[in-house]
Amino acid sequence: MKIKPEKNQITWGLTVFVVGVSLMLAYYVIFDGNSIIQALSKMIDSISAILIGIVIAYILIPLLDGLEHKLLMPIYKKRGYDVSFAENADRGKRKQMRGIAVLITMLIFILILYSLFGSIIPQLVVSLREIVNNFPRYIKNIDEYSNMFLANNPELQAFIDSQLDSYYETLSVFVTKNLKDYLPQVSSLGNIVKTASRSIMSAVGILFDLVVGFIVAIYVLNSKERFTTRGKKLAYALFKENFANELVGGFRFVHKTFESFIGGKLIDSLIIGVICYVGCLILKINYPVLISVIVGVTNIIPFFGPYIGGGAGALLLVLIDPIKALVFLIFVIVLQQFDGNILGPRILGGSTGLSSFWVIFAITFFGGLWGIVGWLIGVPIFAVIYALFSRITNHFLAGKGLSTETADYYDLAYLENGERKLLSDKSNTRFHAVKEESTIRRIFSSKKDKDNKKK
């Protein structure tokens, strides 16, 4: 005789299983977290080439879509071919169009990389070499400027000299100790060969990851609809209709947020870098290519990026000419005001929907977790989390028949049997709704005011 379990028994069994697995995971995370982190690191390292390819493809998807919709589809339509995603469309021609679009996209990508490495990188190398060669002269300039400034401030000069002597002594001890520890390790020929071999293998590994990532990017671009289609198929197979719809919609929101923010930020930073280069040429600032690359690259980091780029450029120029450094700082401040108030909003729009406070929080939090990567992707990740909590909050509010508009809670003191009690109504005194008199006001209020209050 077959025993068929009841539905509630299956539900309880699955619940117990999920709880048990969750408890085990929690135990390992709390008491053996380093092993899990190391395992995850090894796993990520093993698929680093795949991740690089996915990132490259994700960045290039807007370019691919633009080529298809703005250039290739109209050409095929004029020739009488339907290459849309309708059921009666010509699938063969659509595959052909996709292949052409992927080829053009990757050629543009290669051209951009060639321009970067073929024109900008050599100029950066020349600038850095020139800085190294002229470094003694720059130090002499700083020494002359500092002596000129401190000539009339003997007390300040004595303080700075004492601090420099202290730092020099600490640095000497640090360098001497580390050299004593390090020199025996590299003294033998075998250790030198091992170090060189590791460096060569690391370079070969990076090159291999880039080549594989390039190939993976081609496959992802060519089959991006297939991945999304199978994802939707799996969602509707496993979950109920409403939940599956919410899940698919959530992934669309994540994609839209990341695509708008990352793509917009790259374009915005490129434009800022070009404007900075032109401005440096007009102002006759030294090393315009190097400084513009620094400003453009750091501009990708939200909020803090402009300050990092401007500070790094000014620090470099201080060694050459402090007046030019001051001019550059003023120029960067004006440039960042233009970016923050005019260019950035037009390109990014409301891609994140976060206030300045939450942007700073996201950069600080995810930057502490993942370093530079966290600075770059922390804002869109937190924007998705923020939107999820907002959606859940609004869902529960609507279920209770309450307003989901944030503005409706600005003057709210409390709810009483579903009725809104307002802060502006002084008769609503429950739950500390009435603002208490400040300590300073109580101290300095006159006896007459106190008597009037008692009356």
Image (spheres, grey):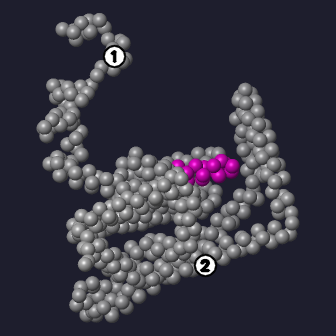
Amino acid at circle 2: Phe
Would you say residue 93 is visible in this rendering?
yes
Q: Along the line of sight, which residue is nearer the eye, 23 or 335?
A: 23
Looking at the picture, how far across and down is residue 94, in whole percent? 33, 89
- The quadrant where residue 163 appears: top right
* SS for callout 2: helix
For the point 36% across and 12% down, the residue is: 443
Looking at the picture, how far across and down is residue 409, in whole percent? 22, 41
Residue on which the image places disc 2? 208
* SS for callout 1: helix
- The quadrant where residue 155 appears: top right
For the point 24% across and 46% down, the residue is: 406
Q: Which mark is residue 441?
A: 1
Residue at the front extreme of this rendering: 1
For the point 51% across and 82% down, the residue is: 215
Q: Quadrant of the N terminus?
A: bottom left
The stretch in magenta equals 307-321
- The quadrant where residue 87 appears: bottom left
Secondary structure mostly seen in magenta is helix
Looking at the picture, how far across and down is residue 119, in whole percent? 60, 72
Would you say residue 67 is visible in this rendering?
no
Q: Quadrant of the C terminus?
A: top left
Is 317 within the magenta? yes
